[in-house]
Amino acid sequence: MSLFEIELHTDFNYRETAYIVQSGTPVSFVSKDIVKTCFDAEDLFTEYKCLADNKCYRFTITDLGGDGICCNHGNGWYKLRYKGAVLKDSIFEESANEVTLFGDCKQ
């Protein structure tokens, strides 16, 4: 098992933001390991989860407004860490979603 960390700073349109972590293969993701949809405006949120080492994971963050979490309605951002290393540090701007694969994702 290895530690996965999500650090998220929401924008003012926090009700538009959600994320999910799924495990599976690089082609098909079915399980829902983490699902989060309830946040506060301009809030810093951190979640930790121990994940199995021998699986491929997909992190997807979505913004229902389609403009991301920065910079139209505040200065949102997120950071992902797995096994102590930073996977992604993003302001998630001008988009409806971003996807990050991590773990054992060999095809």
Image: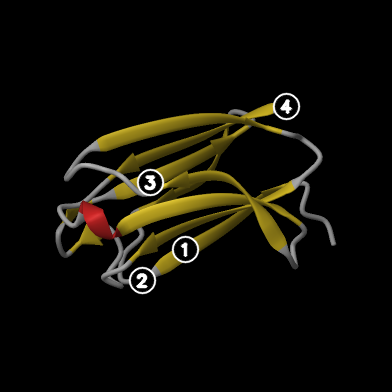
Residue type, numbered disc 1: Glu
Tag 3, which secondary structure? strand
Q: In 3D space, how far apart are the residues under numbered discs 3 and 2 (Cα atoms)? A: 14 Å
Q: Residue at x 38, y 32 (%)?
A: 46
Circles 3, 2 touching at the beta carbon (< 8 Å): no
> In the rendering, at what x and y percent does residue 38 appear?
31, 45
Q: In this view, does 13 lie to the left or right of 24?
A: left
Dot 3, how many residues are within 10 Å of its Cα: few (below 14), some (14-19), or many (20+)? some
Circles 2, 4 touching at the beta carbon (< 8 Å): no
Q: What label sits on residue 1 in the rendered view? A: 4
Using the image, determine if residue 27 lies above or below residue 11: below
Q: Earlier in the sequence, mark 3 or mark 4?
A: 4
Which quadrant of the structure image shows residue 54?
top right
Dot 1, how many residues are within 10 Å of its Cα: few (below 14), some (14-19), or many (20+)? some
Residue type, numbered disc 2: Ser
Q: Which of marks 2 and 4 is nearer the N terminus?
A: 4
For discs 4 and 1, the disc positioned in front in the rendered view: 4
Q: In 3D space, how far apart are the residues under numbered discs 4 and 1 (Cα atoms)? A: 25 Å
Q: What label sits on residue 73 in the rendered view? A: none
Q: In 3D space, how far apart are the residues under numbered discs 2 and 4 (Cα atoms)? A: 32 Å
Question: Residue at label 1?
Answer: 98
> In the rendering, at what x and y percent does residue 14 appear?
23, 52
> In the rendering, at what x and y percent does residue 40 appear?
20, 42
Question: Residue at label 3?
Answer: 78
Circles 2, 1 touching at the beta carbon (< 8 Å): yes
Tag 1, which secondary structure? strand
Question: Residue at label 2?
Answer: 95
For discs 2 and 4, the disc positioned in front in the rendered view: 4
Q: Is residue 83 left or right of residue 81?
A: right
